[in-house]
Amino acid sequence: MAYFDTQLRDGAVLDLGCGQGRNAIPLVHMGFSVTGVDLSAVGIAQMVADAPSGPGTLTAKVADVYEVQQIAPFRYILLDSMLHFAAKDRHKEMGLLHNIASGMAPTARLVVCMPDVEQKTRFLFSAVEPMLQSLQDERFPYVFEQPALKKGQAPHRSVSEYRMLVFSKSA
Ligand SMILES: C[S@@+](CC[C@H](N)C(=O)[O-])C[C@H]1O[C@@H](n2cnc3c(N)ncnc32)[C@H](O)[C@@H]1O
């Protein structure tokens, strides 16, 4: 959100794997036009129920991110906690990144947030290079907090190292 807060509100955001709108909702609050795509109809319904009516707009789609064809109209393509590069998904995820890199507009930005694991970052770079170049690279602690769901259960809190990379088309 700190990154998006530095950006002009004139571009549309494609939030791939938006879940319940953890990013999409604050982006609408900031004034962005957001399209959120997720396979989970439950997640999409929760996002729509919690979304503000403005100042931005929200378009919600239950769909497979691997089927999304329209990348070019978006100024920002966001993948937060969507890429894992586990052996069974790696080929597919790298194909998705390659398609985004080749289909995005010359002025667009690809924003990826993922665990700060060197090997995973190498997969990311090898999928988008040489089409994209990294513009911004930030490390930050990702804090996950969940209140106790049942009586007698302790609340959960964990912190992991995360990384945000912003890419644009190479010059
Ligand atoms: C870890 S959550 C991240 C959600 C959100 N980006 C965030 O950071 O809060 C991963 C999300 O990706 C969605 N997802 C996984 N595979 C997908 C696919 N092939 N197409 C669309 N959504 C998918 C899941 O339903 C889930 O909501």
Image (cartoon, grey):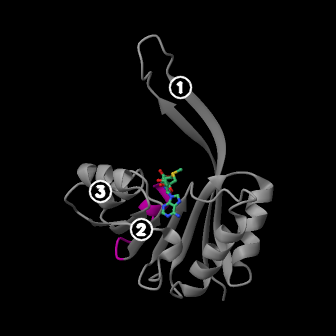
* Disc 2 residue lies near ligand 1 with CB under 8 A: yes
Residue 7 in view (yes/no): no
Residue type, numbered disc 2: Ala
Q: Residue at x 51, y 16 (%)?
A: 154
The secondary structure that most of the magenta stretch takes on is: loop
Could you tell me how far apart the alpha carbons at marks 2 and 3 are, in whole angstroms? 24 Å
* Disc 3 residue lies near ligand 1 with CB under 8 A: no
Residue 105 in view (yes/no): yes
Q: Residue at x 45, y 55 (%)?
A: 1
Judging by the rendered image, the residue that carries numbered circle 1 is 156
SS category of the residue bearing label 1: strand
Question: Residue 21 at what x, y percent from top left?
Answer: 38, 53
- Taking the image as shown, residue 31 lies to the left or right of residue 121, namely left
Could you tell me how far apart the alpha carbons at marks 1 and 2 are, in whole angstroms? 31 Å
Q: Nearer the viewer, residue 61 or 163?
A: 61
- Quarter of the rendering containing residue 141: top right
Q: Earlier in the sequence, mark 1 or mark 3?
A: 3
Crowding at label 1, few (<14), some or many (≥20) Cα neighbours within 10 Å? few
Question: Residue 55 at what x, y percent from top left?
Answer: 23, 63
* Disc 1 residue lies near ligand 1 with CB under 8 A: no
Q: Nearer the viewer, residue 80 or 19?
A: 19
Against 47, residue 143 (above or below) is above
Q: Residue furthest top?
A: 152
Judging by the rendered image, the residue that carries numbered circle 3 is 29
Q: Residue at x 44, y 83 (%)?
A: 70
Crowding at label 2, few (<14), some or many (≥20) Cα neighbours within 10 Å? some
Residue type, numbered disc 3: His
Tell me the quarter of the image containing the C terminus. Answer: bottom right
Mark 2 vs mark 3, foreground winner is: 2
Q: Earlier in the sequence, mark 2 or mark 3?
A: 3
Which segment is the magenta one? 1-10
Judging by the rendered image, the residue that carries numbered circle 2 is 63
